[in-house]
Image: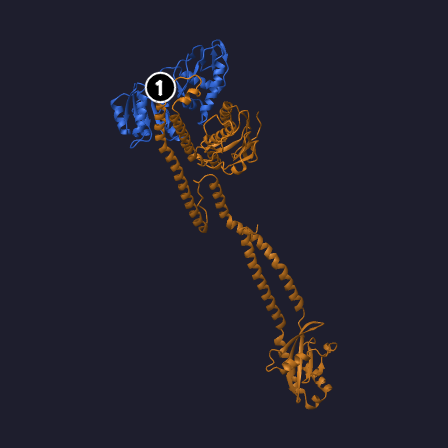
Chain colours: A orange, B blue
Amino acid sequence: MIDTLRWRLTLWSLGFLALSLTLFAVLLYVSLARTLYHHHDDELAHEASALGAGLRERLTARDAASDEALAAVVELVRDDVGGSSARYVMLRDAGGKLLYRSASLRDLQPSLGLEEMFVHATEETGERSRFFDAELDAGPTRFICEPVSAGGRQVYLQVGIVLGDVRPMLASVRTLSWTLIPLVLIITSFGGLVIARRALRPIARIEATLQAIQATDLSRRIDERGTDRELRQLTVTLNGLLERLERAFASMREFAADVSHQLQTPLTVMQGTLTRALPDEAATDESGASTPADASRDPVLRGLRDNVHEMIAIVSALQTLSVADLPARRPGNAPVDLARMCASVMEAVVALGEAKGVEVRHDCASGVRVWGDEVRLKQVLLNLGDNAIKFTPPGGLVRIAIEADGRWATLRVEDTGPGVPLEDVPKIFRRFYRAPQPPGAGAGPPGTGLGLAIARRIVDAHGGTIGVESTPGVGARFTVRLPLADDDPREPTRRA
Amino acid sequence: MRLLVVEDEPRLAAYVSEGLAAEAYDVDVAATGEEALARVSRTTYDLIVLDIMLPGRDGFDVCRELRAARLAMPILMLSARGLTADRVTGLDLGADDYLTKPFEIEELRARVRALLRRREPTALLLAVDTLTLDPITRVVKRGARRVELTPKEFALLEYLMRHAGHAVTRAMIAEHVWNFTWDRLTNVIDVFIKHLREKLEAPGERKLIHAVRGVGYVIRP
């Protein structure tokens, strides 16, 4: 499934979407966090500088000497400056000693903010380390450091503000991201599949048409109307290719037809000359069969004539072969009722079997109809019947059955001959393949080696399959499957 | 009987004309369609053997022209193409029979004889010796004995009896009695002839169906 273009397109677009959504979420989160943490910074700086100014103004050298007095001054300044009671205020000396801390900070570790103060104090500009965050019970708290020189003493003022519910806000943003992104991806993947399928639908249509064309009819073309511009070029190219293929096949067919045509006149003349050269040919003979006297009549001419007969048979089979693969669905062709066709053909096949002493049984279900050319479909049945009788010794049995099987019409021809050697199975449908002459093959001339090749071409042209199963020494079974005519309201009923 | 053979291939023309001349027909040969039409305008022919593939005006064209001129002599077409389409075209244009190359000269002679005979009116009841066949009621009798035949056997016997006394080839039988071509039909016809003989020629009765070597079969008293 993953190897289809549709799925790969979907997966690729999904991958890119996942990547960009994640990037978007991370950037959003970082910038949101930054904004939420920093949005009190100006306020803090303003307050810290106000407190610092107040301290410088109020703090005398005397007060500065005593820590208690210093703390009292700070309280005083805080009252002057005002501001929220939620503010945390600490004051340290240059040594880091905590000189004052607001009531809200009493329960906390005295070391809070100590390290940050030193970092700030030792830094050149101090801008970068001016702010720091601490985690208090009330929530994340942001502090500012403000160095103040007041009353002849260098002290550090640290003012903090609780940031409130920044953390739950960010957490909910995280949660939303991790749940919404997969949800969006799932929805998009369905959408992507649908889009990919829609986008590939013209290609699927082209493929279906090509499939039908190569199975049956090279004269068909892909519809060039209604395709998008990108695919129209492909369609036009494919149609051009089909055009050339069709012409190549047609010229092959014409060549075979021309060759057999050109051979026919000299063969006719040769046959006539030989017939005239052989005396007493037209004499009336009761049996119509060869008499012992035949053998004594010029065996050279007789052998020559038999060979000319064989050549004539081959040339005529070549001609049949050249039209065997004309497409089944052509103007003028219609659904063929195989049972009706079978009836007229079987009589002849049974008689041919009788000539050799082979019993032929047939069983054709009625109402089995396939689309095609009745003349050529008869040829298939005749060639297979001929072949089966040829390879069945006198006293043997050939069974022929036609039935509907799902969406297929099945024709089976079974014989009780020597079977097809396993290594020859792939070869028997090739042109000019001739099996070793079977025992008791006396009746009839040697084959042209084209009968099964013709049958196969005709079956192919009708969109069907032909195959052989064989048990050496027991017999062979040829099976032809042809697609049933689509508009066929069939009720296969058996007929004896 | 005067016959015209229209054939551009000299060897085949010689083969056909000699073969027909041997049967005591007067045979003229034309090599092109134009020449054939010119000859027909000067001479009345009893039958024309016409090849389809001719330089210039082809056999179809000549056939059409002759029929348009209301000339009714039988036309036997020759073609190397065994395709049904050609056959249908030829017969549609008014040809009376159609022979595919390669053919035996005896085949051609038998067909020519059949075509020349066709103009004789056919009897309503066909009879050979004590054998009678009624094409309308489809009743076959040998003397007083009623003979039951299958449809195919009946068609075969009717064809033989319509040409009683004249040999018909297996190819002619195949074309007229079977509605498909098959190179094994010659063997099939032999089997049907055997069945007919078994039914028609009871022990003690005169044999009616005879094999003609190199040709086919004939029914005669």
Q: Given the current orientation, which residue lies at the most extreme front position?
A: A296
Q: Given the current orientation, which residue lies at the most extreme left position?
A: B42
Q: Nearer the viewer, residue A67 or A454?
A: A454
Q: Check the residue under mark 1 and report the chain it is in.
A: B
Q: Given the current orientation, which residue lies at the most extreme bottom position?
A: A62
Residue B7 found in image quarter: top left
Q: Position of residue A50 (x, y in %)?
A: 64, 81
Q: Which residue is mark 1?
A: B113
Q: Position of residue B3 (x, y in %)?
A: 30, 21
Q: Position of residue B100 (x, y in %)?
A: 38, 28
Q: Nearer the viewer, residue B86 or A199?
A: B86
Q: Position of residue B161 (x, y in %)?
A: 42, 15
Residue A225 makes an appearance in the image: yes
Q: Quadrant of the C terminus of chain A?
A: top right
Instruction: Please state if A295 lies on the left or on the right of A142 as rendered.
Output: left
Q: Secondary structure at mark 1?
A: helix
The number of discs equals 1
Is residue A410 positioned above or below A149 on the image?
Answer: above
Q: Given the current orientation, which residue lies at the most extreme top position?
A: B144
Query: Which residue is at a point 49% across and 48% down the rendered structure image?
Result: A203
Residue B65 makes an appearance in the image: no
Identity of the amino acid at label 1? Answer: Arg
Residue A403 found in image quarter: top right
- Dot 1, how many residues are within 10 Å of its Cα: few (below 14), some (14-19), or many (20+)? some
Is residue A68 positioned above or below B181 on the image?
Answer: below
Residue A268 found in image quarter: top left
